[in-house]
Image (tube, grey):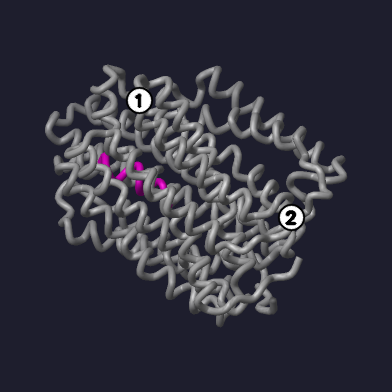
Amino acid sequence: MEEQSFSKRHSLQVIFAVAIGTFMSALDSSIVNISLPVISNYFSISLTTVEWVVFSYLIIITSLLLTFGRLGDIYGHKKIYITGLIIFTAGSLFCALSPGIILLVASRIIQAAGAGMLMSLGPAIITINSPAKDRGKALGAIAVSVSVALIAGPVLGGLLTSYFGWQSIFYINVPVGIAALIWSIKILPVTKGQKKMPFDFAGAVTLFISLLAIIIPLSLADKFGWTNPFIISSIAAGAGLFVLFVFIEKKSSFPMLDLELFKNRLFTMSNIALLFNFVAQFAISIIMPFYLIQFRGMESSEAGLIMIAGPAVVMLIAPVAGYISDRTDTRYLSSAGMAVASAGLFLLGTLKADTPVWLIIFYLAVCGLGIGIFQTPNNSAIMGAVAPQYKGIASSMLATMRNLGMVLGAAFAGSIFSSRLKYLMSALEAQGTAKDAITNIAYPGAVRSAFIFAGVLASAAVIVSLVRGRQEKSA
């Protein structure tokens, strides 16, 4: 299956079609968060229950991305992508019409299945329909779409919820989804799949259960503690099932995930660097709202505007980094980006009770600058490291690392922050420190620990990016 060539106009139309799907699926990862208190009151349920509106979406997407990528390689990328748009739009309508929390969570699972198809195949469609010399610039559209979604999500979600109710954050997907469906059917070229290759159901089911067994306890570890028997046993069972999955794939004549891909150092190291990047990046998303709202006493709207700094810089820098990556060795660009991001995370670790707002914005912008420089060249390296018939699985691997990084970032950063805060407050109280001073000392100390952890991971990504090898620029 050879890479197809198109006019510049048609290539831009393909990029736009994929960008819409990416934007919608990423938007629904962030637009719901700000509406959780309203949904909680509407259904008269606790915060721990309503959080499953978010958890269910993220868990299902992460668990199914590789499966959808393989299905795209077998049956054709356009076919699966179009199916994803239909399921996502229908799931959005079901969410808006849900009369209870159980049906809302079930509808979010349906919506997540559609979003997973969009996320897993977007980069593959762009890569196949872009010449190798312009791949980085084209993939920059994905990074921009995600960044715009992260920026627009909290703002748009707050406005819609305030004026039209929480249901409107799902209703808005219906007309946009229908328009995107019509546009994608018209614009996206048909790619021939490998239908003669049977789908690996045993591998897909084993991997799905394995990831569920690992991701669900990770999302709950901050609440129940890492020593909780359920947390430990579930993660252990998930790890065991993953080993079984590897065994199944080695024995299968038509594996869902061709393990030979991981003999390619460029592919493997780039994915590991991406995982580290998103673990570190999501630590910002988890810790900063607590620091700004709970500790500094800011309004949610003010905190949201401050946190826009990072994604806004990513949105501006990602296309530029993609353009440069098409003309230089991506490993140096990716490593430089993670070095800058690491510096920004260590700077965030210096936050105190009286740190000026402009300095907080600057620190977040530094992180955004580094992430923007890193992501597009790294994504280009991943997609360029595999043969055309594996673009779908490479694309879904990219999305899997991104979502798994989000889960791990939330779990580890939240756990480090919470445990460190409790320890410092207890220690200061035992020393007889004044109550007013305890919080002002303990809170920045807990923030520092979480961001040092994230900064160390970002520094590790610098090394991983450097040792991954050179990316070939030929088609």
- 158 and 363: which is toward the camera: 158
Quarter assignment of residue 379? bottom right
Q: Is residue 158 magenta?
A: no
Secondary structure mostly seen in magenta is helix
Q: Secondary structure at mark 2?
A: loop
Specify start and end residues of the magenta stretch as a single range: 281-290
Q: Is residue 391 left or right of residue 106?
A: right
Query: Which residue: 57% across, 72% down?
Result: 135
Dots 2, 1 in contact, CB < 8 A: no
Residue 194 visible in this rendered orientation of the protein: yes
Task: Name the quadrant of the C terminus.
Answer: bottom right
List x then y, in percent, for residue 27: 38, 48
List x then y, in percent, for residue 35: 27, 35
Residue 452 visible in this rendered orientation of the protein: no
Residue type highlighted by circle 1: Val
Say which residue label 2 marks: 193
Q: Secondary structure at mark 1?
A: helix
Query: Which residue: 24% across, 29% down?
Result: 38
Mark 2 to mark 1: distance in Å? Answer: 40 Å
Say which residue label 1 marks: 50
